[in-house]
Amino acid sequence: MAREEASPLRRGWTTGACAAAAARAAYAALLTGRFPDPVTIRLPRGQRPSFPLALAELENGRARAGIVKDAGDDPDVTHGATIVAEVAWGPPGSGVAFAAGEGVGTVTRPGLPLAVGEPAINPAPRAMIGAALADLAAAHGAPPPDLCVTLAIPGGERLAEKTMNARLGIVGGLSVLGTTGVVVPYSCASWVHAIQRGIDVARAAGLRHVAAATGATSERAVQRLYALPDHALIDMGDFAGATLKYLRRHPLERLTLAGGFAKMAKLAAGALDLHSGKSRVDPALLVELLAAAGADGATLAAARACDSAGALLAAAGAAAPGLAAGVARRAREVALATLSGATAVEVAIVDRGGEFLARVGG
């Protein structure tokens, strides 16, 4: 029997696209007294999606429209949230101004592409919203609009606790994001975006030392060791390459890369994406490093029979510290080569209990 092919993952719409559609619907109500439902917008790459309205209110010269975000098959924290745009007339000549409503954060630290005090509505969604409103004005023969657009995401402050916003200095809620308007499932674009903005914030704050960690345990260990502030911590996850390449273009003085033994073993082998679906531990390299650490023949034989990095580390016995140090040295060499020498690098390997197995380059 032929095996059925897996269905392709369904794409979705960014928060910015939903906000643009909601703002267009609300502005249409101001112009005509009626809400288009569904409302259609044009995205930066030419797609023309339509969105059904979940909210439509018009009173006293203000209109509110809401759209339930559909992120497709992406595990987006805002999937199912309602994106609300309230549109009101602004002073003549003011253009389109933006404000943060319930659940949309405010920028409190420099380094982001928005000034301190601005609502956390990124430049690309602002441009998308502005284009949607200008297109509608032109279609009705109206001049370029002077409007105040207030975006809200009810429950957004609670959802923001699952994001990196607090470290970036965005308080009070979520960011309105999205460059193309389309969410590609599991592209991890938002995670890479958070890494880059975290580095930007650290640089703007004048920090000399940041730590990029693969997980919470290693991050806490390094933070305790160096008493680093929260905005010096980069939640790198599996994206070592994205972190190092961005630092190559936007260098900081000092970087600590921290993670568990298996993740750092992948980096030592040259892998820059540490996800299990993208890279594998190289047992031959680990046995080579174990031999260099002085392990005897019986230990090496036991290591060759292991089927995981953790098992191999356990089989290393007394040579385990030397093996961990060898992995850290190799991982540091890969990191330095990727950075092209712009940043001093330390690699720290941390066990599941939060203790350091090795630190090289500190």
Image (spheres, helix red, strand yellow):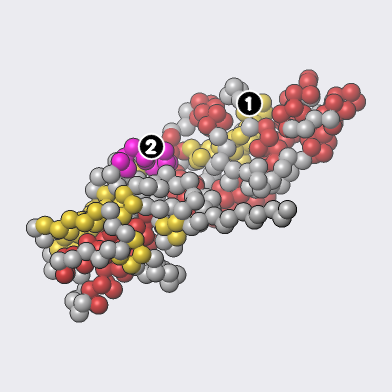
Residue at horizontal 43%, vertical 72%?
46
The answer to whether 104 appears left or right of 7 in the picture is left
Q: Answer whether labels 2 and 1 touch (C-beta < 8 Å).
A: no
The answer to whether 131 appears left or right of 31 in the picture is right
What residue occupies the far front of the structure in this picture?
A: 1
Total numbered circles: 2
Within-10-Å neighbours for mark 2: few <14, some 14–19, many 20+: some
Q: Is residue 122 within the magenta segment?
A: no
What residue occupies the far bottom of the structure in this picture?
A: 141
What amino acid is labelled 1 in the image? Asp
Residue at horizontal 67%, vertical 37%?
264
Within-10-Å neighbours for mark 1: few <14, some 14–19, many 20+: some
Q: Secondary structure at mark 1?
A: loop
* Mark seen at residue 351: 1
* Mark seen at residue 325: none
Residue 6 at least partly seen: yes
The picture places residue 208, in percent across and down from the top left corner, at: 49, 41
Residue 146 at least partly seen: no
Displayed quadrant of residue 145: bottom left
The picture places residue 179, in percent across and down from the top left corner, at: 43, 60
What amino acid is labelled 2 in the image? Glu
What residue occupies the far right of the structure in this picture?
A: 297
The answer to whether 265 appears left or right of 130 in the picture is right
Displayed quadrant of residue 2: bottom right
Q: Nearer the viewer, residue 303 or 228?
A: 303
- The magenta stretch is 155-165
What residue occupies the far left of the structure in this picture?
A: 60
The picture places residue 266, in percent across and down from the top left corner, at: 70, 41
Q: Nearer the viewer, residue 285 or 281?
A: 281
Give the residue number, with chain letter if any, for mark 2. 161
Q: Using the image, determine if residue 109 lies above or below residue 128.
A: above
Label 2 or label 1, whichever comes before in sequence order: 2
